[in-house]
Image (spheres, rainbow, N blue to C red):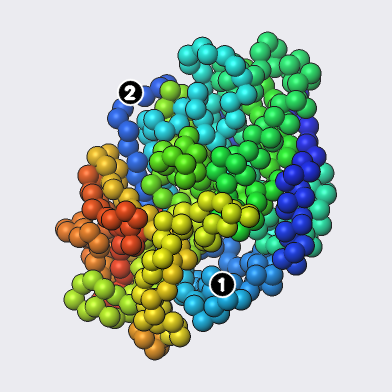
Amino acid sequence: MVRTIGRRPSPRTLTAGLVLLLVASALVLGMPAESADPRTLEVTVHDLFRVPSGGFGDAWTRRAEIYHRDVVLSTAFPLLVKHTPDPMRDPGNYFLTAGHRLTVAGRALPEMSIDTPVILPRLGRTTASGGTASVDLGLTFLDRAGWDALRASGLITLTWDFNDGYGALLAGTVTMDALGAEKVLGLTGDPAAWWSSNAGKATTAWSDWLDVEGNDRLEVFSAHRLPFAEFGFRLSLTTSTPYVVVRLELAAFGIDALLARWLYWGTSDYLREAPAGALPFEMAFDSARLVVHLTSTADLDLSAEVVYALRAWASSLGSSPGGPAWVWQPTLRDVIPSDPRINPLSELDAYAGMAYVHRTPGSPRYGAALAYEYAPAAWDLAAGETLRFLVPREAVRFFAPPSGGTSDRLVALGGCLPSCGGAWDPVGGVLEVRGPWPMAAPAPPSVGMPWIELVPGAAVPAGSADRRHP
């Protein structure tokens, strides 16, 4: 039996989202036994220049029409975007960017648990130990067809005209044992009978929790440039003895930024405490699938497309400094400084009064020292942590500094900061570094670390396959 309830958007979230937009113009998971293994985290960067995987659809078109920040330079491999952070105030300050896929596997992570789930509310009051919940959620930015399908299903009432290209759907299942359901939902007794009497209350409480997460505890405004704004939320409950399964559908603006906040800040309050999340960085997800099994710790698997993650730059490492390069670095999500009237906190505030030299080939700002419009992150790899970086085994486009002249070349590793030593396999095109690997970065870091440069390389050895997947 399936029981579904939708919640009308709250006046706060709906009004904030609509006003600012107008101004701008079932899978049931198995429950594995709890592990006593030590914490591990494996991060793999792959499928460089192949993101977004479906190409630049109508959601990207809407973003370009409204905000004028992005110009698509290539619709086939290598997929490239010219990104201008502030086209109104500084149209000459642009970056040549590309994306990649990110795969994360974390085991026995203490940063999340059934008692502090981070990505789920904790609506129950029980203090009993134990319980499990398995979360399987997908994040997608809505194209026109997806938007219209949600309208037809009754989840949303807004028309496509209200989408600025950043309307997204977070949907999937949360599968809980009895104690897990009591902790997350407050559910006790017969699940169907409880849901029949409490579905509306539970849905409202979950939605209110999301609003607090996005607009208070983790404040996505500085990352999203707008408040977190829900415009459709629905929960459905089924049972699959001995488990309770809740299907979640959330249509919202800013949910991608909130997902990044959850994974980086964890249980901490944004910028009021030190970050305490499972991931050592925040990045701009274009789509993602997150699978988490919560017990006294968490096992986490993330597959995400990350945009704006690579920048064409002038190399600073290796044997040919000043030559063409693509640079990867971990970053945080915030893209605007704070303003006490609308967003009192920002990760960029640590860089107030600081500048860095721009090295985008062809840019009129090449060589200029300008204020930070992004916040670098420093990832000190601890024991049990691994970074794996898979370099494309086919030609990509390089931009020569300072003119911006182009050439299509194969790819090699130019260098790492700090040095990655012998971790590079030039035949396989694989960089793999295992912690401990301290960054020795200043606070705040002047660049994201590790800083990895890709440069024009030699021919691919015969018989080598394109490394697209981890």
Is residue 351 among the parts visible in the rendering?
yes
Q: Residue at x 23, y 71 (%)?
A: 317
CA distance for labels 1 and 2 = 49 Å
Is residue 305 among the parts visible in the rendering?
no
* Residue 36 higher or lower than 54, as above or below: above
Amino acid under label 1? Asp
Viewer-closest of 296 and 338: 338
Q: Which mark is residue 232?
A: none
Q: Is residue 323 left or right of residue 221?
A: left
Amino acid under label 2? Ala
In primary-sequence order, the first of circles 1 and 2 is 2
Q: Is residue 407 left or right of residue 425?
A: right
Corner quadrant of residue 392: bottom left
Task: Say which residue label 2 marks.
Answer: 36
Label 1, secondary structure: give it. Answer: loop
Q: Position of residue 207 (x, y in %)?
A: 69, 36
Label 2, secondary structure: give it. Answer: loop
Q: Is residue 270 left or right of residue 17?
A: left
Q: Which mark is residue 86?
A: 1
Q: Of discs 1 and 2, which sits in the foreground? A: 1
